[in-house]
Amino acid sequence: MSRTREFRRGDAVTVITESGRDEGPTFVLVHGIGMGDRYFSDLADSLARVGRVLALDLPGFGEAPEPRHPQTMSESGEYLAELIAAEGLDDPVVLVGHSMGTQIVAETAAQRPDLVASLVLIAPTVNPRERSAVVQAIRLLEDPSLTRPKVVVLAIRMYLQAGPRWYFKKLHQMLAHRIELVLPDVAAPTLVVRGEHDRLAPRPWAEEVALILPHGRYVEVADRGHETMVTAGDRVAELIAAHVRGDEVGRVVERVSPPVRSSRIEKAWWWAGDYVYAGWRQLAIIGEGWNPPARWRTGDPSRPEVVMLPGIYEHWSFLRPLGDAVNREGYRVRVVHGLGTNRRGIADTARRLGRALARVPVPPAGRVLVAHSKGGLIAKHLLVAEADGATPSSGRGLVGLVAICTPFAGSRMARLLIDPSVRALLPSDETIVMLGRASSVNARIVSVFGRFDPHIPDGSLLDGATNIRVPVAGHFRVLGAPETHRAVLEGIERLTLAAVDASAIEQAAPE
């Protein structure tokens, strides 16, 4: 049973709809521009099972009357703090904001940290690279939210209720506000939630929000846009409840450290050392044989199996030091045979890889691909093919990819060789261009690379992925460095935890 009341300060009136239990945390839901508490109805119902819910109609929206003048985002944050204080609660609240609401709750959390136990920012605005009413309108039209009838019906009804005059007054305040300047002052643990296909809050911006926050974590809801909590209310509620319990929901976003400037002499020395290492690893097969150690097949069955892919002109023993390190940590390690010198086309090799994996039973915890150089492109091609439906995803159990020194954007150095299999790595190659545009799977990729790579001078940084730079130089000898081994193990763990979170959300979703 919900109860409705009003909070007044001057001519500003907020309608509060309360539901839920007397015990448990108190959730305060703050809507975006043009919306109201009904936009949170499914989320509010789910959260009401674990605590008390206060869903708001801010001044001028929903059932709340329009005041004479719109508040700035900072004033709205102060006003919200007064509302919370007036409730006389025994404990700090959980603030949940959507879109423009994220700006308001961030202001409240920064101004009155004593009132806020934790914070949730769903689809944070405004992306500073697109701080324009015209661009925001275009992004809204591009967002998949408009393909969902429930969202469209709710939006039309609430926009008409607010009216265009008040909407544009508030839009001006929203665009003028710079949430990125407020976030560093937010002390509460904060979860940033983004729909996978949200065009108003693109992944780089949403990740930046999580990065700026002192205690921020980032999570995505698959196959959703800007309206995430409308059509996936139960999923978002589960994430929020876990966040409030103190669980490590999603992941921490880390900025890649800037590359270190090096002299030509240093680079030449690194280059020479890299080829010495590559030559040594090529000769290692004489002593190590054609098959990896038998112990690689043993490990903790509760952990995913690690499948290793070498790069072009490489055999499995190139990855021997890395494979040993991963296996020592309890992972079973498998190597795909039959690639030869890995000179076939990327797409063809990806299909062969897919067929090879489908012939072997999927471990209960799935598989993580760990690949070097061209092997990372092959692995990403397989992930893209599965995501696009071109290749069935069943039968492989792919959790994600840890790529080491992979030329995701190609390599201009490829033009120095006449071998067609190497020249296929040019930035202009059709497959390289396609893989660069296919960003939907990047969240399932961890890219590991060194401080200097003579084969990939433009680097292996991949937008939307987790990027880890290790303090080691080279394209080949990176594979033998303990720093790389630690980064790869961290990447495997990140992907595994993300897959567990996604699985929990899927199981919690209503049928």
Image: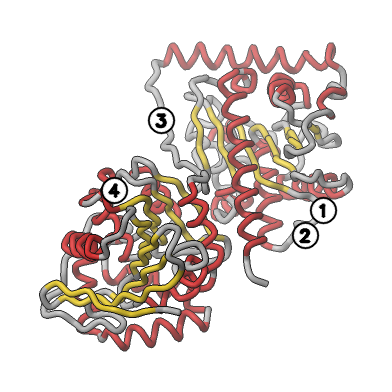
Residue 318 seen in this snapshot: no
Q: Quadrant of the C terminus?
A: bottom right
Work out whether mark 2 precedes mark 4 in sequence or the reverse, and give the earlier one: 4
- Residue at 46% across / 64% down in the picture? 198
* Left or right position of 264 against 292: left
Residue 358 visible? The answer is yes
CA gap between label 4 and label 1 equals 43 Å
Marks 1 and 3, how far apart in space? Answer: 38 Å
Tell me the number on the disc at residue 183: 4
Mark carried by residue 392: 2
| Label 1 with label 3: CB-CB less than 8 Å | no
Pointers 2 and 4 in contact (CB under 8 A)? no
Residue at the image position 60 percent from the left and 51 percent from the top: 501
Between 349 and 480, which is closer to the camera in this rendering? 480
Q: Position of residue 97 (x, y in %)?
A: 36, 63
Q: Residue at x 38, y 52 (%)?
A: 205
* Type of amino acid under label 3: Ser
Comparing labels 2 and 4, the label whose residue is closer to the camera: 4
Q: Is residue 401 depicted above or below 100 in this figure? A: above
